[in-house]
Image (cartoon, rainbow, N blue to C red):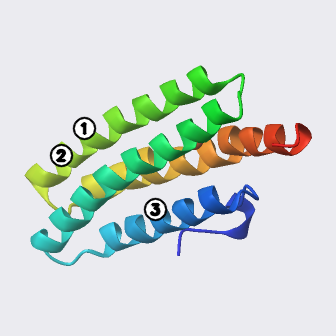
Amino acid sequence: MLWSKTLETGITKIDEQHKELFKRIDALLDAGNKDRLKETIEFLDSYIVEHFTCEQKMHIDSKYPKATAHKAYHDNYVTTFRKMKGQFMKEGHTLTTSQAVNKNVIDWLKEHIMVHDKEFAAYCKNNGK
Ligand SMILES: [Fe+2]
């Protein structure tokens, strides 16, 4: 499992969605056949957008000062993910596509959670949100 406790922000709703994301990315790397792979990528594609929309709503509702910058990180990630999706759909499971998932999907997500989502969690905690 790619998820670890150090990734917890302390905001239950966000943590639950992050866990689900990592679970699905695990499944993506494990997908044995093309149909399963396609299904998992399609799920991730919509789940990522759904999750980011939910986070962004929380940012706005709590008047988070870095809401705009945070949304820009999310938008960039969706673009990167869709590029990777195109590559996966074309080439299937190869060493190159797996490496792309590790670098562009997993590493980015971990870094984003550790830095930016935790920063939002700290803001909520410090401002009684
Ligand atoms: Fe985020």
Judge whether 92 appears above or below 30 on screen.
Answer: above
Mark earlier in primary sequence (3, 2): 3
In the rendered image, residue 31, in percent from the top left (x then y), is placed at 25, 74
Residue 129 pos. (x, y %): 80, 43
Indicate which disc residue 124 carries.
Answer: none
Where is residue 91 drawn, in percent x and y?
A: 11, 54
Of the four image quadrants, the one with ligand 1 is top right
Q: Assess disc 1: are there few (<14), some (14-19) or many (≥20) residues with their C-alpha within 10 Å of its C-alpha.
A: few
| Marks 1 and 2 in Cβ contact (< 8 Å) | yes
Q: CA distance from mark 3 to mark 2?
A: 20 Å
Label 1 vs label 3, nearer the camera = 3
Mark identifier at residue 87: 2
To which quarter of the image does residue 23 belong?
Answer: bottom left
Image mark for residue 21: 3
Q: Which mark is residue 83?
A: 1
Residue furthest to the front in view is 61
